[in-house]
């Protein structure tokens, strides 16, 4: 049942990314271009997501356990360290240069866009570099 729910959730998420055009790097870069030809439409997508998810997160968080799994799995870590800062900067640079972040990038592979495929390939190379150098462990 978990896999079916995960599949349905992923499909709904992917459809939402397509409808909102978050899989379109030009749309995302237009949103990030605050001092040029700014396109505020993705702000409405994000605000809509927050309006729905924020109250539900707090309601669901008060439950003893999730509906489809045995326990909640989220981080309570509030530490700001060099790894977080460097990782955030790399994420932001990748988002700004490529016009995609991981979720929309993976969804956009279905569009067979060579830039998206290259982005996802580079993203996974980055994952493995971090794993190889054991940089993901907290110090």
Image (tube, rainbow, N blue to C red):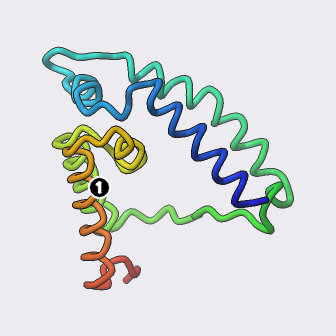
Q: Image quadrant for the N terminus?
A: bottom right
Q: Between 82 and 103, which is closer to the camera in this rendering?
A: 103
Q: Residue at x 44, y 24 (%)?
A: 20
Q: Residue at x 83, y 55 (%)?
A: 67
Q: Name the quadrant containing residue 136.
A: bottom left
Q: Between 49 and 14, which is closer to the camera in this rendering?
A: 14
**Is 33 left or right of 130, judged from the image as shown?**
left
Q: Name the quadrant containing residue 51.
A: top right
Q: Name the quadrant containing residue 8.
A: top right
Packing grade of label 1 (10 A; few <14, some 14-19, many >=20) is many
Q: Where is residue 106? Give x, y as percent.
A: 39, 49
Q: Count the marks: how many?
A: 1
Q: Between 71 and 6, which is closer to the camera in this rendering?
A: 6
Q: Which residue is mark 1?
A: 120
Q: Residue at x 69, y 43 (%)?
A: 57
**Is 131 left or right of 55, judged from the image as shown?**
left
Q: Residue at x 84, y 53 (%)?
A: 63
Q: Where is residue 102? Give x, y as percent.
A: 37, 50
Q: Where is residue 70? Give x, y as percent.
A: 80, 68
**Is 115 left or right of 58, judged from the image as shown?**
left
Which structural element holds mark 1?
A: helix
The furthest residue to the left: 36
Q: Image quadrant for the C terminus?
A: bottom left
Q: Is residue 110 above or below residue 119?
A: above
Q: Is residue 7 above or below residue 69?
A: above
Q: Between 132 and 14, which is closer to the camera in this rendering?
A: 14
Q: Is residue 105 above or below residue 30?
A: below
Q: Where is residue 131? Give x, y as percent.
A: 33, 80
């Amino acid at each position: 049942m978990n896999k079916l729910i995960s599949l349905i959730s992923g499909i709904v998420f992917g459809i939402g990314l397509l409808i909102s055009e978050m899989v379109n790097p030009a749309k995302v870069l237009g949103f990030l271009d605050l001092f040029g030809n700014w396109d505020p439409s993705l702000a409405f997508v994000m605000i809509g997501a927050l309006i729905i998810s924020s109250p539900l997160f707090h309601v669901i968080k008060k439950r003893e356990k999730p509906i489809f799994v045995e326990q909640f799995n989220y981080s309570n870590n509030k530490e700001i360290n060099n790894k977080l800062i460097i990782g955030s900067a790399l994420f932001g640079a990748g988002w700004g240069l490529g016009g995609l972040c991981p979720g929309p990038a993976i969804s956009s592979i279905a569009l067979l866009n060579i830039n998206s495929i290259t982005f996802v390939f580079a993203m996974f190379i980055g994952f493995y570099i971090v794993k190889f150098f054991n940089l993901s462990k907290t110090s």
